[in-house]
Every structure is written in structure tokens, then in C-alpha cells.
Image (cartoon, coloured by chain):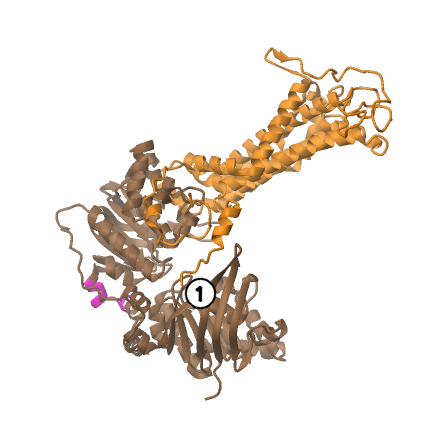
Chain colours: A orange, B brown
Amino acid sequence: MSIFGRRTKPVEEQIDGDIFNKETDGLSQGQIVRKRFVRHRGAMISLVVLLSLIIFVFSALGFKIFGIGYGGWWKYKITDIPNLRTTGCSIELPGCPTLDLLPGKNFGLGDHPFGQDDLGRDYFALVMRGAERSIEVMVVIGLVAGFLGIVVGSIAGFYRGVIDAFFMRLVDFIITIPVIVIGSVLGYHFGSKGVLFLALFLGLVSWGGLSRLVRGDFLTLREREFVDAARVAGASNRRIIFKHILPNAIGVIIVNVTLIMSGAILLEAALSYLGFGVVPPDVSLGLLISQYQDSFTTRPWLFWYPGLIIIIVALSVNFIGDGLRDAFDPRQRRRISRKDRAAERQPIVKK
Amino acid sequence: MSSPVLKVSDLTVEFWVDGVWYPAAVNINFEVEAGQTVAIVGESGSGKSTVAMAIMSLLASNARVSGGIQLKGEEVLGASPQVLQKYRGKEVAYIFQEPMTALNPVYTIGFQIIETLRNHFDMGPKDAKARAIELLTMVEIPDPERSVDKYPHQLSGGQRQRAMIAQALACDPALLIADEPTTALDVTVQAEILDLMRGLRTRLNSGILLITHDMGVVADMADEIMVMQSGHTVEYGTADQIFNRPTNPYTQQLLASVPKLGSTTMRILEPSQAIREPVLKLSNVTIEYPKRGRLPAFVAVEDFSLEIFPGEIVGLVGESGSGKTTVGRAAIGLLPIKSGNLEVVGQDISGASQKDLRRIRRSTGIVFQDPASSLNPRLPIGESIGEPIFLAKIAKDKELDKRVEDLLASVELPRSYRNRYPHELSGGQRQRVGIARALALTPDILIADEPTSALDVSVQARFLELLQELQGQLKFACLFISHDLGVVDILAHRIAVMQNGKLVEVGSRDEILKHPKHPYTQRLIGAVPVPDPAEQRLRREARLAAKY
């Protein structure tokens, strides 16, 4: 049995001979982090949920990358306008959702599981396309902003001096301009080039806060003795930054990146609402919600499904972030199983 | 004689941790009479501070206390917060270990003393201030009229501790609890603070409960001593009994592991100095911290010359702020030198490029002061130890694994520890990891920067033994930086003494310790408390006689 990570207290020096002589393979930091991440139940479940959701969403309407296309398995496209239907569902309203999980005469998916919008377009198709767009925006903004924030923050905090001053004034400049204004201007000029282009630009302007936080952490951590120890061991600056200091700052980074990612969905929704983000006939989840905000009392399903997907995505991202942070933080102890706990109830005092 | 100031009977403190009650102190019994000093001695984790906290009712909320604590005959255990508030500060005062953190940095020391006074007495602001100045005069703070308006950061460490004592004495407490009052201070300052406390005890007739791990301090102060080990009292008796006729094996071991100045008889072989080149050669080195903003440049080390030969251990001693650590860090190229010449293994380090520096560092190693901070908390220790080898491209994968295992074995750590993180080890184990890393490339010179100051005496004794053994095997030269003359005495062939950035005296161990020439060295040696009450009294009298 491994005694690794069970208790945070330093173990007494007098340990049994079999533990002393036990063969233990050396594990690198990366291997240990991976092992701990895989062991984090919440994060693994969320990872599976998020991945399945992404596959489900992207395959529903089909996609086309580098000429390889897949038509999608759903019968409607977002441009199809079938007739508005009032029967076949329990609520009996025009365009009501036919998805019914309770046994009865309407049990099953039906023709329009998520219902239809006011024109009669299939809402399932709209939600799938919207989720595609929202996930794309979120991932691109998260990656671009995360990468820039980490790199700029690390370099500024580690080298200090002129480099720091330059980058931080740049951050000042970017932070003072409201993102919504930049987004509108960009959306107005480049909206036609697609949502990914917009997401890229939004990523380029939303890394300021993260870089400040990373810089702050680096300023404290670079004075710690283990940095000197690494330097004496012959580590280069690059190795010190990425191998020694960055893992110590990972908590701040992950919390901030997950916030940026959930913020990205809202930012995209706000821009779309103003008419500068995703331009119809294309849709996004934010756009769907804001378009039908007046129908909340009469046709609530136009809210339910986009909202549900946003919640699932945001929660999964947060849980995965949690798992990563715990995996990097050695002080996060593994939850003690019931068996271990029973063993620990035995008296601990020797005398 | 009336009832004792403090009577602790059958005190048991337990903490609720992870569903288990961990006993921190078990069946503790002792009494403190007025004008008497009782010392609780023990290593870290033995429960001495827990006892003190229980007396003040300052324990964390997951604690369970049973037994009795009587203050001047009144039971205080389980008393209401109002009652507790009345006796805290007034009847019982507490002197904390770290005066910088225990004093509030945003208020003047005068304000903090006045606050205590006005909380407990019906006193106007003017009277309170007059009394505060009086108290500061009593604890011998220079220029009390002006010091009363100073902030904690404007005072030196010793003055801060004096201010704390003044605050503690504000209401003439019947009992003074001093929790490691001198641990954060230099020896000469420590001697002054102890003199002060001894003087106050006779003047105010209060009882003192002294908590410390330093047997020298105990010998200097205590009338009665209680030795604690993992929550239990192992021995309780008068100072004379404990020091001269200890019956418990733990007490004997504790006393034996205290390094005693000038008592080491075993001489380590003198290396043949004449033939070989020095491994570390500093000639007229000046190190300066450059000016930052409005702060002027600060010269930390001035005109410093020292040579260390292969296989030799040189002890570098001095008080805090004397520049010892600066010398050590400059020697491995972590700090640039302003002028002079610094050669490591025959290579000039002062103008070396990054690449040269990296090569030079392969023949040096350093053990840092605080193992908790010098090991990367996010890196398993096996990787920390293997890093120098990996980066020097000496070994990889399987071979590296083997080297790491050998190194762990050589510092007597189990191989299975290699995947552990630093916080899962005890202080002594961490410091051994620090040594293993420093020795990973079998350096010619090892810089040890106060490696034992964070360790308990018995752990320190084992650590020093290990270091001596390794030095005997590997024959590296060592610059051992320490403020503790006792430790340097055990290890060093030669000793260099620093004061305010300058080298004061350098010579063989016997020359420095037995016949110090420079008055500063004499003062330093005179201030070290000896763990023997009778001898300590003689030394104290000699020191005071020299002072006046």
C-alpha cells in the first residue's frame, strides 16, 4: 500500500523496515500531476461530460475542415423552415418541444425535441449550431488570453525592470479600453470573416488581468530560495520560469483562465445582442437567449436548452480547472476512503 | 508564603484532527511562585506552547482542555470571555517569540502600551503616556521620550522585544509568560534581554513562565525546569537537579546534544594547506546592494579577504546583518561583487559570463538556511535532488534514478521518499534533502548557510554528525556560516568572525574560541549562554563586570 499523500503531517522518522527498503520508481513532477489529476473524480467526470458534449454538438449539424466534411446526423439545418406545429407535445402550444422522457403517448424525441422558434425553425438545430459557436469562442479566447497572460506575466515578473515596465504599461493601455467597444468595432469591420476571427481578437485584448496576477505571483516567488537553489543547480532562466516558478503560480492561473472562459461566453452574448458578434443567420447560445428574452413567460423552452448547455459547459470547465489545481498543489490531500478512515480510528498515541 | 501565582493541575489538551483527538499535552502539573522562574523545555512539537496558550485560553477552536488552571487561587479554565479579558494583560502577560509580527505595524509602540493601560485602568491619555515613557525607561530603551512615538519597524530587533516587554509589564502582571523570547535575537542582544528580565523579576516580584528550546537560556534564568517530550512531562525538578543529575534518558540525551562551547576534544585532521591551491579565494571583496529609489546603496561587505583550502571547514560567524550570508551567496555567484577578486577553484567569478558561471557552479554546492523555502514545494524531492545532475547532462533516466537513490541513501533517507513533496517531510529530513542536492555533483566546495538554525538540538546534533561523516568521505571544503558558536566549534578547522560587513578576526578554532584577540569576538563568546547554571552565573558576572 502506498503511503503517499495520505497524511500531510511529516511522518516520524521511525518507520517500518519494509517501507524503508521498498523499491520506488522515481516519478517526475509531470507524472505525479497526471496521476493525481486522473484520480480526481470530479475533474474526470467533467472531462468526459465536456468531451462527449463537444462530440455530440459538433457532429449534429456536420462540419467541414480542410475539405473533409461530415453531413451531420440531424435532419434539419438552421436554414430549414418547417411548418409550425402545435400538437405532439404535452403543453400544446405553437412550436412546443416534443422531447418527453415520461412514459406516455408522447414518449420519445418527436419531430422537434427542443421545439421550434417563432418562424418555425427547428430549435434543436439552432441550439447545436449556437453551442458550436459558443464553445469555439470560449476555447479560442481561453487559449489566446491564457497563453499571452501567462507568458507576458511570467516574463514581466521574472525579469522586472524595463521589460516589466514596458509590458505593464501595455496592459494599462489595453485594460483602459472597454472590451465591449473594441469588440463592437472589430465586429463591425470583421464580422463577415467569421466568429473565430472575432474570438481571436477578443483573446488578444482580454489577457491583461491574468498577466497582472501572474506577474504579482512571480514577483514574490522569484525571491524564494528555491529559485536560487535551481540557479545554483545550473538551471537556465527559461527552466526556472516554466519548471520551477510557474507550477507554484498555477492556482491563480487556473482560477483566472476559467473565469476568462466563462466570461467569454457572456462577452460573445453581449456583442451578439448589440449586433456585432455572431451575425444571423449564424447563431450562438448567447444570441439565442438574448433574442428570445421576451418569450420567457410564454415559451420558456427557448431559454431552457441554451441555458442548460451554457451551465454544463461552464461547470465542466470549472471542475476541470479545480482538478488541475489540486493535481498541481501537493498540499491538496486525497480524500480518505472509508477503509483508511476506519484504520485511522485506531489509537495513534504510542504511550 | 501565599498561594502560588499559577497552579496547573492535570492539564490535558487535545486537538480534533481528521476525526481523531490528538493529545498535545497530557497530565501537566506545575506551579509558579511569585518571583520564581519556571522553564518549560522541549523540542518543537513537544507541546510547550500549547500549555502556555491553554493558560491564556488562546487555543484554537478544535481544542479540548481538561484539568485545572488556577491563577492566584482562582480557576480560570472555562471562565467566561469577560472574566478572561479582565485577567489577560492585567494578571497574565505574554511575550511573543517574534516581536515584529506580535506588534501591530501601523501603530506606534507608545500607542500600543497606552492601549493596554487604558483598557485595564481608569487613566487619562496624558497619565497613560507618562506611564508608557516610564515603562520604556524601565526596559532601557534609548531615548524613551522620542521612542514612544516610533513605529515597530523603526526599532531594532532587541528594542522591539524590549517594547513588547514594556507592554507586557504595563499592568504589573503577577505572571509573565515568555514564549521563546530571545529565539529571534542575536546572542549579545539575547544576553541583554535576559539580564533585563532577570532584573525585572526581582524588582516586580512576578512569576515568570519561560518557554524555550535553548538549554543555555534555561541555565541562565530558571529556578525550576520541566522537560517535555511529545506532550508528556518527562522530568520536573530544580535547575540544579536537571542539569547536574538528570535521571530521565531523554533529558540526558537533550543535554548531550547541546553543542557546548570549547568542549569538543576530538580534533579533525588538519589538512595540508601548504601545497595546494585554495578552492575559494576572496581578496579585498566589496559587495554592495545597489541603490533603489530613494534608498541609498548599501555596502554589505567591505574589503573582505578569506581563503579556504581543499578539505577544510571554515566557520563564518557574526550577528544578523553582519554580511555572512552575503559572502556565502557571492561565493557561488548569486550576487555580483563590486570590487576585489573572487576565485572559485582557480577561476575568477567576478567577470564570468553566464556560461562560465554555470560551469563554475558545478564544482560548488549550497545548503540554504530554511529548507522549507529552498526546496520547490511543487517538485517531488527526488526531482529536486536529481536536477543538478540532469542539468549538467551527467546522467539520464535510469542512471539518474540510480544516482538519486544513492544520494538519498547517503543522507540516510529511505528511497521510497523520492516521490514525496517537501511538506511531507520533517525539518531535519528536508535539510538532509538540501544536503543531498548540494552534494549531487560532488562539489569541491560546499557553502552551508545556517543549515541548522531551523532545527531542534537533537536533530541538529544528528545533522552535524552526518555532515561531518560526508565531509570525511568526500573531502570537500566547506564554508559554514552560522550565528551559533557552539555549532561552529564542533565542525570548523578555522573560524572567521564578521562584524558590520568587515572581517574582524580569523584564526584556527582554538585561537578564536580560547584566546580571542579582538574585543568583539570576546564579547560574542562571552554572550553565549552555557547549559550549566553554575558556570553560566560565573560567566554572567564576568560579563557584567567587564561592562561596567
Between A55 and B541, the residue placed more toward the observer is A55
- Residue B236 percent across, percent down from the top left: 37, 75
Residue sitting nearer the eye, B204 or B29: B29
User: Residue B79, located in which quarter of the rendered image?
Assistant: bottom right
- Residue B106 seen in this snapshot: yes
Most extreme residue toward the bottom, as rendered?
B1
> Residue B405: horizontal and vertical position, in percent?
31, 41
In the rendered image, is residue B146 in sight? no
Q: Which residue corresponds to the image point at 46% horizontal and 50% vertical from the top-left? A: A8
Position of the C terminus of chain B, as image quadrant, is bottom left
Three-letter amino acid code at disc 1? Gly
Q: Horizontal and vertical percent for residue A13?
A: 36, 53
Which contiguous range is marked in magenta? B510-522
Q: Which chain contains the residue that carries disc 1?
A: B
Q: Classify the position of the N terminus of chain B by image quarter.
A: bottom left
Tell me what residue is drawn at x 37 percent, y 64 percent.
B186
Q: Which one is in front, A282 or B541?
A: A282
Residue picked out by circle 1: B47
Magenta span: predominant SS is helix
Q: Secondary structure at mark 1?
A: loop
Membership of B118 in magenta stretch: no
**Residue B500 found in image quarter:** bottom left
Which residue does the image show at 32% across and 74% down from the upper left?
B242
Left or right of B295 in this view: A252: right
Give the left or right position of residue A262, taking residue A23 as reference: right
Question: Can you say whether A7 is above or below B39 in the image?
Answer: above
- Residue at (54, 63) in percent of width and height: B63
Question: Label 1: few (<14), some or many (≥20) within 10 Å?
Answer: many
Q: Choose top left, top right, bottom left or bottom right for residue A196.
A: top right
